Amino acid sequence: MSSYRPHSVRTASHPRSQKLLPATISRVHTPAPHLRQITLTLPTPCIFKPGQWVDLHLPSLPQPGGFTIITPPTDEGTEFELSVREAAGNPAAAWLWRAEEEVSGREVHVRVGGSFVFPPPGVQRTEVEKVVFVAGGVGVNPFLSMMAWIRREKERGGDWGGVDVRLLWSTKRGEWSYLDRVERDCGKEGARLFETGRGPDGMESLEGWEVQRRRLDVEDLKRATERRHSKVLAYVCGPKGFEDSCIDALVNEVGIDTERVFSERWW
């Protein structure tokens, strides 16, 4: 019996826009064997915040799929990208993983939702020196939008452009993607990669990156925050067990106040 729960059910209590907007799938790209990148173009601007997702209504499917926006908001607001992991048991993902020519050019509808955003509501820029993003697997997706937005703020001379950014990303062997974006928006010096799966602990090189073959631990979190607890924001996104253990460590062992640790409970 399938354990699949529709996105609309899992996120029923999450905030959503009232607007359902038409869009066209203008580009389909497969950057990794397990990931497909979908570009949506809209006739009117779509307002969203870094970290949000969309309800994606697809032809012939009774329930919308839910996919994270991986690009930052732009002034024009008429185009953004989604990252879709291959999952045969997810009807919306399976629809988007059909032959590219069957997907590209199709008309769809989107509704923006989610409260896992950056900057966080109610937090002033003067209260933040550093933001630490902690990702498990495809939990890196909302951080791609957030980090790109911070980089653009820096280029524009915006207040949030001066915040120090760190990324800790743990995923399974062979499931790396978007490392070019991570390097552009965070820099190799600002990111640490951890790979789990078969093989002994150690270090290996991947596309010029150093990848540590072990699980991310509390000492890694302590190094990333540099003990500036009162000025640090921590964002955590990944599978339930990963999120629970990281949040517990950040609060109880690293010492960051609970209200400065943000997570997306999307399961």
Image: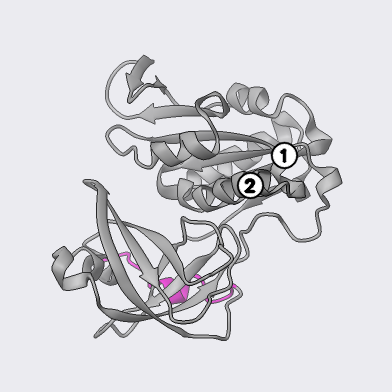
Label tally: 2
Identify the element where label 2 is drawn.
helix
- Between discs 1 and 2, the one toward the N terminus: 2
Residue sitting at 44 percent across and 68 percent down?
79
69 left or right, relative to 90: right
Residue found at x 58% / y 80%: 17
Whether residue 81 appears in magenta in the rendering, the answer is: no
Mark 1 residue type: Val
In the image, which disc is placed on residue 163?
1
Quarter residue 99 falls in? bottom left
SS at badge 1: loop
Closer to us: 100 or 142: 100
Circle 2 Cα neighbour tier, 10 Å, few/some/many (<14 / 14–19 / ≥20): many
Bounds of the magenta segment: 1-14
Residue 132: give x, y in percent of width and height: 64, 37
Q: Are marks 1 and 2 in contact (CB under 8 Å)?
A: yes
Above or below for 180 versus 121: above
Q: Nearer the viewer, residue 208 or 265?
A: 208
Amino acid beneath label 2: Ile
Residue 10 sits inside the magenta stretch:
yes
Instruction: Please provide percent x and percent y for residue 73.
Output: 56, 62
Q: Is residue 221 visible?
A: yes
The residue at 48%/72% (across/down) is 78
Q: Is residue 1 visible?
A: no
Q: Does the magenta stretch mainly form a helix, a strand or a loop? A: loop
Per the image, the residue denoted by label 2 is 150
